[in-house]
């Protein structure tokens, strides 16, 4: 393979690894996704192990995670006993899968915790001193602001997750900023 092709492949795979780590996923997951995304052929666990110099156990475990997130899928190859994989190349689908899984759960958990906090403050209200009631009122004000933010985030995530339209990346590329 030409050295420039190898350099582009290596830097893209490494970059996706760093990006995955930034978003709270393992670097190996990002590198595996990058290798699959840039491969015109389906890749086996052995191909991925050899190509990325990662242990087979790590490749296997991280491939299961990629499958769970809908970022890769197993492909059946006639006459082969090995497992082969391909990447989900539609970034909009990948984003929706991640948002609907992890991010939506986190926002819902934040709303639950905030709601529980409001309830605890209201239940304790009669037992609080005047100074404590002032503090509780301050807490309620701040928590109300947080609830409003997380409710807006929840609606935005729902809008993205429930959208079935494809994102037109070509049109986005034509947008002039600044």
Image (cartoon, rainbow, N blue to C red):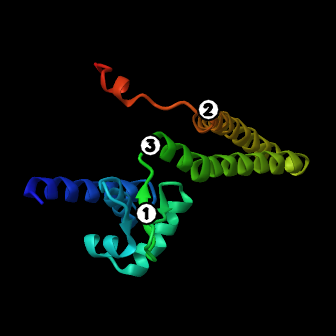
Q: Position of residue 80 (x, y in %)?
A: 43, 74
Mark identifier at residue 85: 1
**Label whose residue precedes the other's in the sequence (1 or 2):** 1
**149 or 24, which lies in front?**
24
Q: Are marks 2 and 3 in contact (CB under 8 Å)?
A: no
Q: CA distance from mark 2 to mark 3?
A: 18 Å
Please state which of the two labelled residues, at mark 1 or mark 2, is closer to the viewer.
1
Q: Quadrant of residue 77?
A: bottom left
Above or below, 173 against 48 in this view is above
What residue would you read off at disc 3? 90
Q: Residues within 10 Å of mark 2 (few under 14, many from 20)?
A: few
Q: Are marks 1 and 2 in contact (CB under 8 Å)?
A: no
What residue would you read off at disc 2? 159
Q: Going by the image, does 167 lie left or right of 130?
A: left
Q: Quick one: quadrant of the N terminus?
A: bottom left
Above or below, 164 against 11 in this view is above
């Amino acid at each position: 393979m030409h050295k420039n092709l190898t350099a582009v492949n290596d830097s893209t795979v490494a970059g996706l690894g760093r990006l995955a780590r930034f978003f709270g996923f393992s670097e190996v997951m990002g590198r595996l996704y990058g290798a699959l995304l840039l491969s015109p052929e389906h890749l086996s666990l052995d191909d991925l192990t050899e190509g990325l110099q990662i242990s087979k156990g790590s490749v296997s475990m991280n491939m299961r995670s990629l499958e769970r997130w809908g970022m890769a899928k197993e492909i059946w190859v006639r006459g082969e006993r090995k497992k082969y994989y391909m990447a989900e190349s539609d970034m909009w689908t990948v984003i929706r899968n991640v948002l609907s899984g992890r991010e939506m759960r986190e926002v819902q958990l934040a709303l639950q915790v905030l709601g529980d906090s409001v309830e605890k403050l209201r239940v304790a209200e009669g037992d609080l001193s005047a100074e404590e009631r002032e503090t509780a009122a301050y807490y309620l004000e701040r928590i109300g602001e947080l609830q409003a933010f997380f409710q807006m985030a929840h609606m935005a995530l729902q809008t993205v997750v429930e959208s079935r339209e494809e994102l037109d990346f070509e049109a986005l590329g034509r947008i002039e900023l600044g």
